Image (tube, helix red, strand yellow):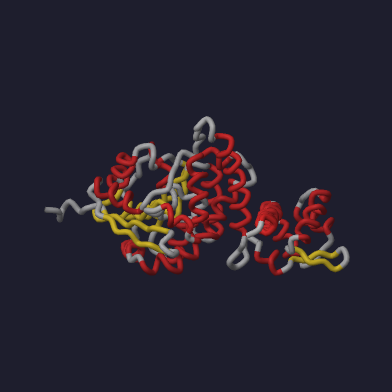
Amino acid sequence: MTPDELKAAFRQQAQGGLSLNVAFIGVVNGLFDALHRLGQAPAAALAEAAGMDAGYVGRWCDAAYAFGYLDASGDALRLSATGQAMRPDAPDTLMPLAVQSVLSAHMAERAAGLMRSGQRPGEQVLAERETVLPWFGPMLEASFAALFEQTICPQLPVFAELDARGGLAVDLGCGNGWYLRALARRYPRLHGLGIDGFDENVAQARRLADAQGLGQRLRFVHGDIHDFTLDTPADLIAMNRALHHVWEKDPATLFAWLRDNLRPGGHAVIWEPAWPDSREALRDAPRKAMAFQNLSEHVQGNHFLRPDEIVTAFAAADMPAVVHLFAQDAEAIVVAQRQDTSTRT
């Protein structure tokens, strides 16, 4: 590329970032949803319906129109096809891209400011932007629930086996509870317990479970895995993109906790981004975002793991494990089983 062509290419990429920033404002303030309900309306009526300031909404409408989220007939505005797709409840919603764009910008700024000192503030950086944390769970749900329900569940018999027993599934770092809700919808006999360190996530998980009629089978509590004991051993303990958040503190103790809180024959199911063995693989399309996210994970005191590291940790806890790869091998599900001491030799 010539210098001018390179500049033009990056300006186009920057426009995409601006577009997602505009969409984020509309998502978190319910503007896409409000205009969907209204059908069409001038900016002032949209502001009133959404309970927002008319001045801000008017300027947002101009930006949303510029980037193609809104169409207009005179003063009347309506959602374009792209605007409809940005609604959080839309099929295959684009909402996660908007939330991720703002979260990524926040993490990039934090990484830039911390690089000289080497400080790693930890998980609280996720709560530093009050508009982001409530959307973190919905972002993950919209990004991964379909893969879980349509591809992972049918290929891993451990979930159907759990349902046949009417067993207890525990989700550590449950977020908004999407994983347990997906299991409960598919498997009517199992019940679940979700544990999370953010009160906002626990409250959201409870609301969503109750709204979907699952509150009697699913319970969500605030807790820290490093200081938490289950009342009864679980049939399955899951960690969904959460293991790397606690790995660096003391993995040996963590894996012993998993073993000791499972009933004999019970399973641990760990879902993690599959960090590749070679740097060259980071240029593959599915892993480019993973490379940036690993930088933001460093800010939080974490790092992504290779699947074989997880298998080795399970082996040290006397739990044989198998790796299953999905999404062009970018997502790893590691299934381990606690040995049944009554049948071991």
39 vs 231, nearest the viewer = 39
Q: Residue furthest left?
A: 345
Q: State left or right for residue 280 relative to residue 36.
A: left
Residue sitting at x 81%, y 64%: 77
* Displayed quadrant of residue 38: bottom right
Question: Which quadrant of the rendered structure holds the N terminus?
Answer: bottom right
Q: Is residue 75 visible?
A: yes
Q: State left or right for residue 98 relative to residue 161.
A: right
* Displayed quadrant of residue 23: bottom right
Residue sitting at x 30%, y 52%: 311
Q: Residue furthest front?
A: 2
Q: State left or right for residue 164 relative to residue 7.
A: left
In the image, residue 183 sits, relative to residue 292, either above or below, namely below
Question: Residue 110: x, y in percent?
Answer: 58, 38
Residue sitting at x 76%, y 51%: 51
In the image, residue 10 sits, relative to residue 188, either above or below, namely above
Question: Residue 263: x, y in percent?
Answer: 27, 51
51 vs 113, nearest the viewer = 113
Residue sitting at x 40%, y 47%: 243
Q: Is residue 23 visible?
A: no
